[in-house]
Image (cartoon, rainbow, N blue to C red):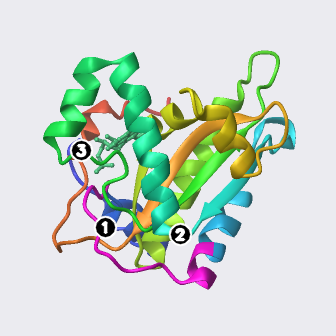
Amino acid sequence: MATVTELSTETLDAIARRYSCRAYRDEPVPQQTLRAIAEAGARAPSAVNRQPWRLVVVSDGAVVSELGASGLAALRVADEAGYARIASRGGELFYGAPAMIVVAAEPQPGLLAADLDVGIVASHLALAATSLGVNSCICGLGRLAFEGVEGEAWKRRLGFPAGFGCGITVLLGYAAAEGGTPHQPDFAKIIEVPAT
Ligand SMILES: Cc1cc2nc3c(=O)[nH]c(=O)nc-3n(C[C@H](O)[C@H](O)[C@H](O)COP(=O)(O)O)c2cc1C
C-alpha cells in the first residue's frame, strides 16, 4: 500500500516539513525561541526517566563557529575523507548556524545506552524548531569538537558536569535560501501486519 494518509495535524505537518538545513543566514534566533526549543527537548521521554542529559544552548554565533573549527580540526586528524567532504561543502562543520543546542550526556550502564535518549531529544529539538519556523540540522559530527585536543576545554567552557560527553549537537537558525526539502521517505519500509 503506497498511499499517503490524508490525516493532518500541526505535529504531522512539522514532521513532514523538517529537513536538515546546511546553509544559514546571518540572523540570530531570539532567546525566547531558543528557550522554547530547549524546553521541548527537556520534555523528551528517556529510559527509566533518567534524563541523562544537559541541554547547552549556545546563542552566540561566534562561539558556534569557534566550536565548529575545533571539530573540523579534529575531523582532519580522525577522518581525512570526511574532512574532504566537509571542505567540498564550504569547509564549515556547522554551516554558519547562528545557534545550536549541544546535548551533553552522561554514559549509562546496561542495555539502554544514553545515545537512545539523546537521539529522541534531538528529534524533539528539531521538530520543535520546525514548528517555530526555525531551521535545524542534527549534527553528529559536532561530537568531534569534544573529542579532539580541545575537547576537555570545551566541556568546561560549556558547563558540562564531570563525566558528561557530547551526545549530539543540533544546529539552529534560518535557512539562507527557501525551498529546502527533507529526504524522500520510503514508505515501502513500513511493514503492516494484517489483523487476524
Ligand atoms: C544521528 C544523526 C547524525 C547526523 N549527523 C549529521 C552531520 O554530522 N552533518 C550533517 O550535515 N547532517 C547530519 N545528519 C543529518 C542527516 O544527514 C539527514 O537527517 C539525512 O540525510 C536525511 O535528510 P533530512 O534530515 O533533510 O530529511 C545527522 C542526522 C542524524 C539523525
**Residue at the spot 37% in from the left edge and 80% down from the top edge:** 27
User: Mark 3 vs ligand 1: CB under 8 Å?
Assistant: no
The N terminus sits in image quarter: top left
Residue 174 in the magenta stretch? The answer is no
**Residue at the spot 77% in from the left edge and 51% down from the top edge:** 159
First-in-chain label (1 vs 3): 1
The answer, for residue 192, to whether it is visible in the render is no
Q: In this rendered view, identify the residue nearer to me: 68 or 194.
A: 68
Q: In this rendered view, identify the residue nearer to me: 121 or 192.
A: 121
Tell me the SS state at disc 3. loop
**Residue at the spot 53% in from the left edge and 51% down from the top edge:** 123
Residue type, mark 3 in image: Gly
The residues tagged by marks 3 and 2 sit, at their Cα atoms, a distance apart of: 20 Å
- In the picture, the disc for residue 164 is none
58 left or right of 24?
right
- In the picture, the disc for residue 6 is 1
The residues tagged by marks 1 and 2 sit, at their Cα atoms, a distance apart of: 41 Å
159 is higher (above) or lower (below) than 181: above
The x and y percentages for residue 19 are: 31, 57
Residue type, mark 1 in image: Glu
Write down which quadrant ligand 1 falls in.
top left
For disc 3, the neighbor class at 10 Å (few under 14, some 14 to 19, many from 20) is some
**Residue at the spot 57% in from the left edge and 80% down from the top edge:** 33
From the image, tell me which residue sits under label 3. Answer: 91
From the image, tell me which residue sits under label 2. Answer: 60
Residue 33 in the magenta stretch? The answer is yes
Residue type, mark 2 in image: Asp
The chief SS type of the magenta part is loop
Q: Over which residues does the magenta segment extend? A: 20-34
The residues tagged by marks 1 and 3 sit, at their Cα atoms, a distance apart of: 41 Å
